[in-house]
Amino acid sequence: MPLFLQPNMKRSSLQHIMALIKKDVLLETRQQYTFYGILLYVASTIFVIYLSVGQPDEKTWNALFWIIQLFVCVNAVAKSFLAENRGRMLYFYSIAGARDFVLAKLVFNLLLMLLMSLLSLAVFTLLLGNPLENALAFVGISILGGASLSLVFTFLAAIAAKANQQAALMAIMGFPLIIPQLLLLMKVSTVAFSSVVQGGLWQMVLLLISLDAMVALLAVILFPFLWKD
């Protein structure tokens, strides 16, 4: 076991979080199943869309982008807790607290989803055209949207991992949480398709950031109750 995860070393919460993030990064870079599998999914899905409809109009382009982002997030992020077996969770319980563990998962999944969002956007513009009037604004919105989706699904995966019906529980809990968020993201991202800035844009962005902060706070508060189960 690497030195940064030795249980007999006294470390601060930040060091625990950084060590757990490093562990996930090392596992991801060694295995790479998730990364290349999702990259193949994104490329093949967008290519099928290109063969079916060519280069769609801006509203369809925007809707398709966020739908694909949703499925990318489910495949990339939702497996994070489900991949941890009982013995490994017991080991993490001995070296780190519940708050450190869930924060490390939130940060790692957020970074992973940011990377996948940028890759998805690159493939999207390559195959389906670029109807964006303000590409830089859409890049920022896609980064914010990727972070939002990753936080929600990490929170759901943390709860579902402790339940017997994991997939069903994620679907039941995720629907009322993710649909309003997707609608808000699609509404915010329309600013990138027009040179005119719509009213209330910053209020919607602040609302989205507030929802992200609330989800992260709920994960930190609620996960310790499931940690000892």
Image: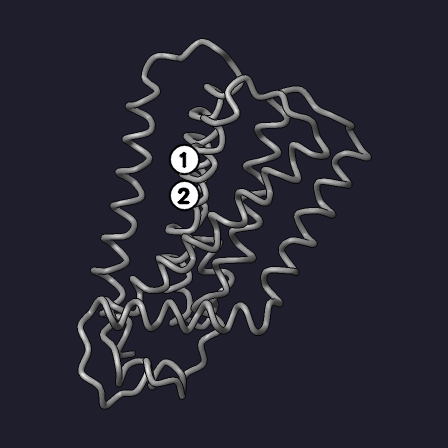
Report the residue that reaches farthest toward the right: 51
What residue occupies the far top of the structure in this picture? 196
Quadrant for the C terminus, please. bottom left
Q: Residue at x 29, y 31 (%)?
A: 207
Q: Where is residue 187 in the image (x, y as percent from the top left)?
A: 45, 24
Cα–Cα span, label 1 and label 2: 7 Å
Side of 117 where 204 appears, left or right: left
Drawn side of residue 70 relative to residue 87, left or right? right
Q: In this view, does 109 lie above or below 67?
A: below
Q: Residue at x 51, y 51 (%)?
A: 73
Amino acid identity at mark 2: Pro
Expressed as whole percent of the image width and height from the top left, the position of residue 220 reads 24, 60
- Residue 30 lies, in percent from the top left, at 56, 73
Q: What's the residue at 66%, 40% (across, down)?
A: 123
Task: Give the left or right position of residue 163, taking residue 57 as reference.
Answer: left
Image vertical order of residue 93 relative to residue 52, above or below = below
Residue type at the position of mark 1: Pro
Specify how the rendered protein is coloured: one colour
Q: In which quarter of the image is residue 178?
A: top left
The label on residue 176 is 2
Whether the residues at callouts 1 and 2 have beta carbons within 8 Å, the answer is: yes
Q: Which residue position is annotated with label 1?
A: 180
Q: Which of 94 and 118 is in front in this view?
A: 118
Residue 161, position as x, y percentages in the image: 42, 69
Q: In which quarter of the image is the N terminus?
A: bottom left
Report the disc number at residue 84.
none
| Mark 2, other Cα within 10 Å: few <14 / some 14–19 / many ≥20 | few
Task: Please tell me whether mark 1 or mark 2 is closer to you in this view.
Answer: 1
